[in-house]
Amino acid sequence: MTQPETQTARWMILAGAVLFAALAVVLVWPASPVFLVAFSAVLVALLVDGLAFLLTRYVPLPAVVARVTVVALIGVGVLVSVVSAVLSLAWAVLSGIATLAVLAGLAYVAYRAGSWLLGSDDASAGTESIGDSWSTTPSGDASESRRDRLRRQYVEGQIDEEEFERRIASELETEELDEIDRELERER
């Protein structure tokens, strides 16, 4: 062969090799997980066989029993690892929830303290309702809830202003009569 023919032959061989390698990659790439699993299986088998050999060297066991023992020990190790991972995840979730609950409580306490210090209506309304519940009689609580109900109906537009004023006046008269009755009972 002459020099140019040899050079052309080399280029064709190189192109064929590159094409073969590209074709092999294209055909083998989708099956790569299978090869990975097969390679892992070979490694695990070598590990089990090597550990079984060490076990039979120091303990008088048949090779099959030693291999089964090694596989069982590896299985227990994997099981313990999985259970440990699940428990640590559960602990992380629970501690996160507890942390959020504590932070929410601290934020609420800070809000209430700030409202109390600044004298906002929200905080004072809460303390007044607490104080009222200790100092009023059961009938006072009932009349208060009736007044609240009337206010809600007025705000929601269920009753008009005239009806609201008429019912509030009636409620106040009933409350005055209740107090007069209580005073008369105390005098008796």
Image (cartoon, rainbow, N blue to C red):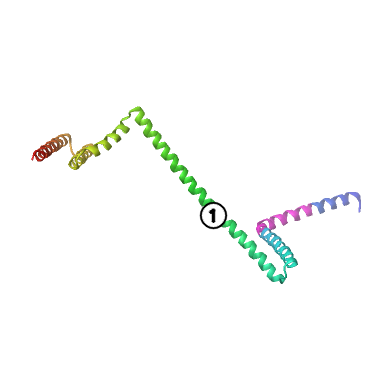
Left or right position of 109 against 7: left
Query: Which residue is denoted by mark 1 in the rendering?
Result: 86
Q: Reply yes or no: does residue 140 show up in magenta.
A: no
Q: Which residues are magenta?
A: 15-33
Q: Reply yes or no: does residue 31 show up in magenta.
A: yes
Identify the residue at the far right of this view: 2
Q: Which residue is located at x 33 percent, y 28 percent?
A: 119
Spot occupied by residue 100 in the image (x, y as percentages of width and height):
45, 42
Q: Which residue is located at x 56 percent, y 55 percent?
A: 84
Spot occupied by residue 45 in the image (x, y as percentages of width and height):
70, 64
Tag 1: Cα neighbours inside 10 Å, few (<14), some, or many (≥20)?
Answer: few
> Principal SS element in the magenta part?
helix
Spot occupied by residue 143 in the image (x, y as percentages of width and height):
18, 40
Spot occupied by residue 148 in the image (x, y as percentages of width and height):
22, 39
Q: Say which amino acid is labelled 1.
A: Val
Give the quadrant of the N terminus.
bottom right
Q: Which residue is located at x 68 percent, y 55 percent?
A: 29
Image quadrant of residue 102? top left
Left or right position of 84 against 114: right
Q: Nearer the viewer, residue 67 or 1?
A: 67
Q: Which residue is located at x 24 percent, y 39 percent?
A: 134
Image quadrant of residue 57? bottom right
Identify the residue at the far front of this view: 188
Q: Nearer the viewer, residue 23 or 74?
A: 74
Relative to 73, say whether 115 is above or below. above
Left or right position of 182 against 50: left
Task: Provide the secondary structure element on which disc 1 rests.
Answer: helix
Q: Nearer the viewer, residue 2 or 177?
A: 177
Image quadrant of residue 17? bottom right
